Image (cartoon, coloured by chain):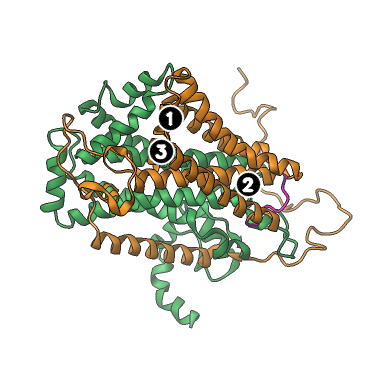
Amino acid sequence: MATPNQPTVTDETFPKQTNKTYALVELMHGEGPMVGKGPDGTVFSFPVVLLIEIILVLGVTLAVFLFSLVKNAPLEAIANPLVTTDPAKAPWYFVGLQELLEHMHPTVAGVLIPTCLVIFLVLLPYIDRSRAHVGVWFSTPRGKRIVVWTALYTVIATAAYVLLDNQFSLREMLRDVVPVWVAQGLVPALIIAIIVVLPALVLRLRKATTRELMIALFTIMLFSALIFTLSGFFLRGPGFKMYLPWQMPNGYNPLDGL
Amino acid sequence: MSVQTRSRWAPLTESRVWRSFFRHGPPNNPLDRSLVMTSNIFLHLHPVKVNRKSLKWSYSFGLGVISAILFGTLVFTGVLLMFYYVPSVERAYPALLNIQVSVPLGQFTRNMHRWSAHLMVLAVILHMVRVFYTGGYKPPREFNWLVGVGLLLLTLGASFTGYLLPWDQLSYWAITVGTNIAGYVPLVGAATKSLLLGGPEVGQDALIRFYTLHIAVLPVLMMLAVSIHLWRVRKDGGLAINDSNDAGDKVGEDAIGN
């Protein structure tokens, strides 16, 4: 309802011409931001980063290109729901879970453990918040030693569990003694929990930092996943029974299923 | 030399069409080297300047870039395969045979797609391992770690959904085993499984669902997440090694141009 051709008070307009091109906002006393710091050690991304990326593109593509020339992707007979392949294996990144299923109840192996792993990964940055030694591999020499010893321990402990449980199946031994949920759920879950918690307790006694504790837990996760995956992929043959890779019956080759 | 080069290309680089595409001069000075990055939608995910330390190969091993390159290879070869593939239980397998036997470079394209897919899962896992052991998840990079965890799950999902598409015995039984694991989830397991498969077992409904997830839903989500991931690396101050003080020189947290 304002009268036309008259600018209202709220509409601020810039003047058409002005001679003033600068303004003094504030006078600061003190030193510049770079005082006391060395050269910042940066380079322009152009062209260095782009060249590195182009080299990586060429290198990675060439590697896949050459491998694709010598090795064909597998293609078996047409899918037949009536004829089960033996063994029937999940893709290699899930075969560790399939190996776990051989040792415990599906709810523990297929649900509880994967859920715990994802929750661990999600909560990790909110648990370990210290900024000390950020950007350094394994943080400290002590961190590196923790990785080496935890990895060694995990490989031995999980490999021993897989092989022993395969030889003297715990759930078969306990079948008639205790309920199913104890034999297949509680007991294997406790064994896994003890394998995970043991190094954490040792570190606790040695006054480890949160970062060192996380390093140990991550290393346990990584290397136990590695052992379960390797066992499921290379050691499981027809009937998902355990064989040595070079003694697979019926000419089964795990690598054909990639 | 540079003067000669410039004069030779001047008719092109100073033309109105060229200047409408690129709003900067030849990137041989600091200003134009900044503009070449900031005025390009693809390059602007990079910082204008990077710390020399973050280019150290033994720090990152280029695993994130390698994962992105493999994703690009997969999109390229995947689109080529889509021209011939038909997601139907009657026609999928014959289409695979056709691609391998009749289509020029068809077998080779499928090989590239298959091996890049396996390699990408591996590269993404190794990238996460690298980021963990160098403490790259610590503040202020917590959010980007979460995006990375999401990208790992998306990568597994993309690989798993692609696994079914050849519709041979290998893919059929791998997906049957894999989705059976999902069925073990208490309460919602059966619902999750039938949501994935569109029925009680792997059939036409499962194939079209996996196909749609594989060629549309998951790649689009991944492109979005990768863009956020890369942009956020820049916003959080580049690689975590830039924040490290162990190398002896003091580097300001804000050394990277934002």
* Helix, strand or loop at mark 1: helix
Q: Which residue is mark 2?
A: A215
Q: Which chain is green?
A: B
Q: Are marks 1 and 3 in contact (CB under 8 Å)?
A: no
Tag 1: Cα neighbours inside 10 Å, few (<14), some, or many (≥20)? many
Q: A142 and A194: which one is in front?
A: A194
Q: Which mark, by number, is residue A110?
A: 1
Q: CA distance from mark 2 to mark 3?
A: 30 Å
Is residue A26 found left or right of A212 in the rendered image?
Answer: right
Q: Which mark, by number, is residue A166?
A: 3
The shade of chain A is orange
The subunit carrying tag 3 is A
Give the quadrant of residue A105: top left
The subunit carrying tag 2 is A
Q: CA distance from mark 2 to mark 1?
A: 25 Å
Q: Which mark, by number, is residue B142?
A: none
Please give the name of the residue rendered at 38% of the width and 27% of the height, measured from the top-left corner.
B182
Please give the name of the residue rendered at 28% of the width and 55% of the height, measured from the top-left corner.
B112
